[in-house]
Image (cartoon, helix red, strand yellow):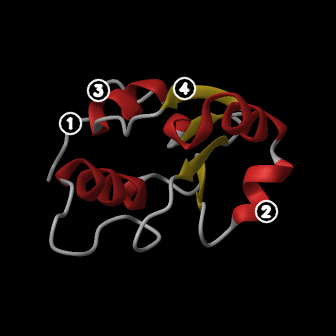
Amino acid sequence: MSKKILNIYDPAMCCPTGVCGTDVDTTLVQLANFLTTLDKEKFEVNRYGLTTEPAEYVTNSEVARLLNEEGVDSLPLFFIDDEVVFKGVYPSVPQLSSKLGLASFVAKF
């Protein structure tokens, strides 16, 4: 089985995970925790921040196109093996796990 590649393009946030400050989004907390539990043998996870890695948003032609056409409201973008699976919203853990082929995953958070 080949490794699935998950690329996440975050909007500008206060820190790389968005789990910071006084107004913490529980979806982001759960997502960050879930990403750390993924089997590194089966999944490669790359997460890019608009403020910290802007070049990644230009070199990926699909990200550049979406930003050009729809602006920053199209962020975050989630790609699995170069296919956009979520756009403009952070998925719940069950939604993302289903897209990754882990439909039986149950959140433990």
Which amino acid is tagged 2? Ala
Question: In this figure, which residue is indicated by the disc labeled 2?
Answer: 55
* Residue 82 in picture, x, y percent from top left: 73, 33
Which amino acid is tagged 3? Ser
- Cα–Cα span, label 4 and label 2: 21 Å
User: Badge 1: few (under 14), some or many (20 or more) residues near its Cα, within 10 Å?
Assistant: few
Question: In this figure, which residue is indicated by the disc labeled 3?
Answer: 104
- Res 4 quadrant in image: top right
* Residue 84 in picture, x, y percent from top left: 62, 27
Tell which tag, 1 or 2, sits nearer the viewer: 2
The residue lying toward the viewer, choosing from 64 and 69, is: 69
First in sequence, mark 4 or 2: give its number.
Answer: 2
- Cα–Cα span, label 1 and label 4: 20 Å
The residue lying toward the viewer, choosing from 66 and 83, is: 66
- Cα–Cα span, label 1 and label 2: 35 Å
Q: Residue at x 15, y 49 (%)?
A: 108
| Location of the N terminus (image quadrant) | top right
First in sequence, mark 1 or 4: give its number.
Answer: 4
Residue 85's tag is 4
Tell which tag, 4 or 2, sits nearer the viewer: 2
Question: In this figure, which residue is indicated by the disc labeled 1?
Answer: 106
Tell which tag, 1 or 4, sits nearer the viewer: 4
- Cα–Cα span, label 1 and label 3: 6 Å
Which amino acid is tagged 1? Val
User: Badge 2: few (under 14), some or many (20 or more) residues near its Cα, within 10 Å?
Assistant: few
- Res 21 quadrant in image: bottom left
Which amino acid is tagged 4? Val
